[in-house]
Image (spheres, rainbow, N blue to C red):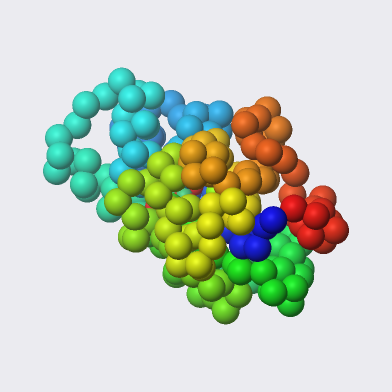
Amino acid sequence: MISCFIFDLDGVIVNTSTHHFHAWQQIANSLGIEFSENDNQKLKGISREDSLKTLLKIGNQIISDSEFKKLLELKNNIYLDLISGLDKNAILPSVTEKLNFLKSSGYKIALASSSKNAKTVLNQIGLNDYFDAVIDGNRVSKPKPNPEIFLTAAKLTNSTAQNCAVFEDSFAGICGVKDANMLAIGIGNKEILYNSDYVFENFGQISNQFLESL
Ligand code: BG6
Ligand code: MG
């Protein structure tokens, strides 16, 4: 029986995935690497460091450690600039409604995001108060697809893995959820998130009855 729902942030709660993509596109351009929306699927859910490593692999490039650090900082500055005006209008459709339902029904709610900017984003969109635990990229040593972030969310909400269901929009995230032995609910494309237990295009398609039946 599910008693705790764990949410990813970027691409699940808020439409920041496109901002991450556009920031990486600028970095790719500066390196002369062609980087498509399709390539960006590989970057979804993974840490900033792993994203840059993946981008360099796509472009078949090797750079120095100091250049690597500089580009990470530059990417983050571009991203922070892109999200500077972010507010509750950026919350994806039906998310607030689902959070209200889960909260009022007594479920535990946690956030498990690879982003080191997760707390900033949550504050900007005003959803902080819904979460019993917030685990972001600063709190884990092994990023997604490692299950650590989800297991930490279970621990901090006094839940067991079997009692947790996770909403995720990335392939890396879903792999981590399955390795944590939790129920994986994909949000997005069925073909990309094929290893999920359930996939919905968005929260508007998820009924409260379905959540209660889990
Ligand atoms: C994830 C995003 O939530 O966070 C990735 O899906 C992003 O695209 C990652 O790279 C790390 O985010 P940040 O904000 O720490 O660079
Ligand atoms: Mg995501």
Q: Is residue 206 visible?
A: yes
Q: Is residue 103 left or right of residue 41?
A: right
Q: Which quadrant of the figure has residue 56?
A: top left
Q: Is residue 27 left or right of residue 8?
A: left
Identify the residue at image location x=30%, y=51%: 141
Q: Which quadrant of the figure has residue 99?
A: bottom right
134 over 68 or under it: above or below: below
199 over 151 or under it: above or below: above
Image location of residue 57, percent across then percent down: 33, 25
Q: Is residue 44 visible?
A: no
Identify the residue at image location x=71%, y=69%: 102
146 or 171: nearer the viewer: 146
Quadrant of the frame with the N terminus: bottom right
Image location of residue 49, percent across then percent down: 31, 43
62 or 28: nearer the viewer: 62
Identify the residue at image location x=65%, y=30%: 194
Image location of residue 94, percent across then percent down: 76, 62
Q: Is residue 76 left or right of residue 7?
A: left
